[in-house]
Image (tube, rainbow, N blue to C red):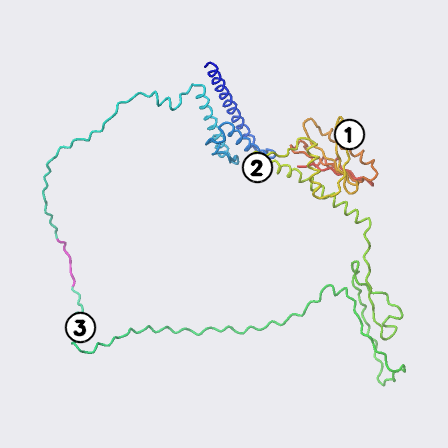
Amino acid sequence: MGRTKSERVRSKQLGIDDVTQSIEQLQAFIPKLEDLGREGFPYLEGAQTRTELQLRECIKRAFGEKSPEFQTHRHLKLSIASSTEKKQTVALIRNLIGSLEEKKLELQGLKPAATDVAAHSPNTSPMTLVPPTVSPAQVSMTSVATTVRPTSATLQLVPSVEYTPDPAPPPGAAPAPVIEPISPVPESVPPPVVPPPVQPIPPRAPIEPISSLFRTQETKAITPPASESPPPPSSEPPRAAVPVPPVTPPPAAAPAALVEAPASPATNPEAGPGAIRKTQEVPSPTLGTDSLATAEMDDLSTTKKLCQRFHMVARQLRLRGEYRSTVNIDDEFDLQDLMHALLRVRFDDIGTDEWTPAYTEGASRTTFLLDHDRLAIVVKKTRTGLSRKDLMDQVRADVERYRARGRCTHLLCFIYDPDGRVGNPRGLENELSSTSEHFTVDVVVAPK
């Protein structure tokens, strides 16, 4: 019997401790709402969503999953856009704290339960409703005749046409003809106005396409005369030669255009009759080192865009459904794993270089190699205690290592700064980026 009583006391004490802990957790949300409401709060959307999830989880632990409080606020959304909405949200949390304090008083025995109040209430004597006795009263009714005085009025006699009913027709007589009502005559409709005929627009002459400017003109073959004898002399006086204006040649065409071939004495139309001009196609220059440089720039621009959008991917992974595990970027190892997965979307061949720099105190780091090891990608994450000078020393150490590699010609350093610890990201990028004849360094700090 004593053991059962001690267990009951212990379970009651555990319930009081749980309620006290839930009250403290709900009170901790009030200063969080004050911080979220101030202007300039970094990453407000992610912090607000995380606070909503924590608040719903706290209500579930405090009141139970099947409680009316949790069923009411299981999809709770924080409203902090204005001071009025923020006050309403704080009042909601204070109401939940008041409910838990009442529950705590009940567990401590300081507040009687509702059933106990009803049980210890004094007994009241039953009351019987007695209908009142109404004594009959004699009521005398006197009828009063009302007299209506006629009002004076002036009547005017208006002559009217007497109506005499038609005499009934005698039996056997023919029925009277029925007079049909005369239909109203429609008003004359004016004749429709015929618009004047539209004169046709003369067709426009077709415009010659631009491509015709680069088209060579073919001349018809001139049939030679039957005999080689000179023409007979004419009696007319010789005409003066008309000067022909010089023909301006068309501008030089792009590669693979049709270019007029040099005329030889045999094919020159002025040299002899029956000559036809010929055209030939100039082949385009073959792609050599320029194509490789273009492909390398495409890989670099794609990787830079991936680094600039990395924080959006990490934030989207945190905004998952209720009570689902997610991926948090806590250190550089998490950063390397997620970056490797994102690079797989674009690149098939991704090399890695495992090495242990001096600034990691024995911890290894992974460098990603693209474009046949010509492009090296190094990732870093800001943290507490990592100063700007330390970060610059680390980047310089990475530059010295990959500058010495024979095939590597480009180093991209991605610095992930989710908490905004880098005060001047643009200045840091300009200070660490460099370009030389055989090696280029690009630094990307995101998010800015």
What range is drawn magenta here?
Answer: 150-156
Which of marks 2 and 3 precedes in the sequence? 3
Left or right placement of residue 115 versus residue 205 in this view: left
Query: Are there few (<14), some (14-19), or many (20+) residues within 10 Å of tag 2?
Result: few
Looking at the rendered structure, which numbered label has been put on residue 166? 3
* Residue 276, position as x, y percentages in the image: 83, 71
Residue at figure coordinates x 16%, y 31% from the top left: 133
Quarter of the rendering containing residue 357: top right
| Residue on which disc 2 sits | 321
Query: Considering only vertical position in the picture, is 109 above or below 357?
Result: above
User: In terms of secondary structure, where does tag 2 sit?
Assistant: loop
Measure the C-alpha gap from mark 1 to mark 2. Answer: 39 Å
Query: Considering only vertical position in the picture, is 273 above or below 156?
Result: below
Nearer the camera: disc 3 or disc 2: 2
| Residue on which disc 1 sits | 357
Residue type of the residue flagged with mark 1: Pro
Residue 79 visible (yes or no): no
Query: Are there few (<14), some (14-19), or many (20+) residues within 10 Å of tag 1?
Result: some
- Type of secondary structure dominating the magenta stretch: loop
User: In terms of secondary structure, where does tag 3 sit?
Assistant: loop
User: In terms of secondary structure, where does tag 1 sit?
Assistant: loop
Quarter of the image that includes the C terminus:
top right
Q: Are marks 1 and 2 in contact (CB under 8 Å)?
A: no
Nearer the camera: disc 3 or disc 1: 1
* Residue 7, position as x, y percentages in the image: 49, 17
Residue at figure coordinates x 79%, y 34% from the top left: 399
* Residue 76, position as x, y percentages in the image: 51, 35
Left or right placement of residue 322 versus residue 436 in this view: left
Residue type of the residue flagged with mark 3: Asp
Is 347 or 381 nearer to us in this picture? 347
